[in-house]
Image: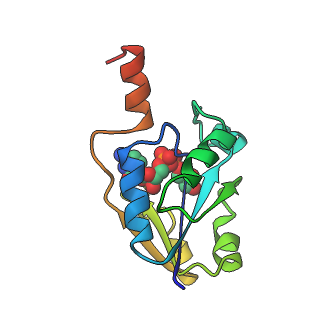
Amino acid sequence: MRTVITYGTFDLLHVGHVNLLKRAKEMGDYLIVGLSTDDFNILKHKQSFYSYQDRKVILESVRYVDKVIPERTWEQKKDDILTYQVDAFVMGNDWKGKFDELCSFCEVVYLPRTDGISSTIIKDNLRGDT
Ligand code: C2G
């Protein structure tokens, strides 16, 4: 079994997230998502609309996602990769180069982001800020 892992906040789930999850799952048989906790979001200077628990329930309903674990720190990725015997670490290419040190433990793949959509764009549009 080939295990893939990815990490993120996944707030206001949108087509960019789904495209990423779909392509990540296509790289293996089992996809784990490290979902940023509400506290870790603060460290990332992100304020998500949905709580961690709600974002977890939503992600677990996505057909491509097999397991959701909490992402509490920047540093946990190596331990997660070893714990879950991960074969490939996948992120959108806005993170290109940021996690290359993990290639000592598994494949590191950066996939093209989906243009024109983000949780911020959604929030700004709903607020009428655009
Ligand atoms: N993404 C994408 N296309 C978009 C928006 C997001 O491919 N239009 C991807 C991002 O590149 C990321 C994933 O979807 O790989 C989740 O995006 P976010 O929820 O914004 O996650 P982020 O805040 O980038 O957190 O330790 C890693 C961080 O937790 C990543």
User: x, y percentage for residue 94?
Assistant: 39, 53
In the visual, does 67 lie left or right of 28? right
- Counting labels gives 0
Which quadrant, please, contains the C terminus?
top left
Viewer-proximal residue among 58 and 43: 58
Q: In this view, which residue lies farthest toward the left?
A: 115
50 over 4 or under it: above or below: above
Closer-to-camera residue (18/35): 18
Q: Can residue 94 be seen in this view?
A: no
Residue at 27 percent of width and 45 percent of height: 115
User: Left of 105 or right of it: where is 75?
Assistant: right
Q: Which residue lies furthest to the top in this view?
A: 128
Q: Report x, y in % for residue 19.
A: 36, 55
Judge from the rendering whether residue 16 lies leftward or rightward of residue 85; answer left or right: left
> What quarter of the picture does the N terminus occupy?
bottom right
The residue sitting at 40% across, 58% down in the picture is: 20
Figure quadrant of residue 46: top right
Residue 85 in which image quadrant = bottom right
Is residue 69 something one can see in this rendering? yes
**Residue 71 at x, y percent in the picture:** 67, 55
Q: Residue at x 58, y 54 (%)?
A: 60
Residue 81 pos. (x, y %): 63, 75
For image coordinates 64% across by 39% down, the residue present is 54
